[in-house]
Image (spheres, rainbow, N blue to C red):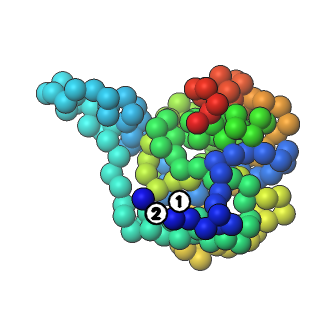
Amino acid sequence: VGICKIDRMATATAKGEGNPVFIVGSSTGRDGIHGATFASEEISEKSELKRPSVQIGDPFTEKLLMEASLEIIKDDLIVGIQDMGAAGITCCSSEMAARGECGIEINLNLVPVREDRMTAYEIMLSESQERMLVVGKKGKEREIKEVFRKWDLKCVEMGKVTSGKNMKVWMGGKIVADIPADALVLGDGA
């Protein structure tokens, strides 16, 4: 299907205690919540009621996000990067932590949202398009933010890699989830 320069590859792995975790790209909305479940259902009149589960993509923003992501990889600013597909932040953060055999801590109050009063459940499971989770190299935060600013994309440091093996989620100054990251992934986290 194509070729790749091996010196410009990135893995979807979190590691390095204290490394910053960023959410980049578009804001998070309620679109796409349970989108993966909806995609597995038989289409019928009943399923039509669940259409808000379907995400609406933005090809222009997707292209900008791809270019910015390639730039931070080329400039060797990151440890890992993963797109937010099915189950959004929940899936990518737990998979990246499990692969790196580490923990991850995130603060949902820092996630850019486009709808009022979103719950932790909604933010964690949103499948809004054009978003990535980036584990940056400690000390490279400013450079990472500058790349995304150049491409006119959001880039918010929302957490860090931890020494434990749990995914710890904060919102409103309280822990709303604290679970072993590998408990949320199948097999080896792939």
- Residue 146 is drawn in which quadrant? bottom right
One can see residue 99 in this view? yes
Residue located 63% across and 37% down the image:
95
The answer to whether 180 is drawn above or below residue 1 in the figure is above
For badge 2, the amino acid type reads Gly
Q: Quadrant of residue 49?
A: top left
The quarter of the image holding the N terminus is bottom left
Seen as rendered, the residue at the extreme bottom is: 150
Depth check, front residue: 7 or 58: 7
Q: Position of residue 132 (x, y in %)?
A: 56, 53
Left or right of 103, for residue 153: left
The image shows residue 103 at horizontal and vertical percentages of 77, 35
Q: Nearer the viewer, mark 2 or mark 1?
A: 2
Whether residue 170 is visible to the viewer of this picture, yes or no, is no
Q: Callout 2: few (<14), some (14-19), or many (20+) C-alpha neighbours within 10 Å?
A: few
Query: Mark 1 is on which residue type?
Result: Gly
Q: Quadrant of residue 75?
A: bottom right
Which circle marks residue 113 in the picture? none
Q: Is residue 64 left or right of residue 141?
A: left
Q: Position of residue 28 (x, y in %)?
A: 49, 48
Circle 1 SS class = strand
Residue named by callout 2? 2
Q: Residue at x 37, y 36 (%)?
A: 35
CB under 8 Å between discs 2 and 1: no
Q: Is residue 56 left or right of residue 76?
A: left
Q: Which mark is residue 25?
A: 1
Say whether disc 2 or disc 1 marks the residue closer to the N-terminus: 2
Circle 2: element type? loop
Residue 30: image location, x then y, percent:
42, 41
Query: Which residue is drawn at the image coordinates 75% and 29% (left, top)?
Result: 166
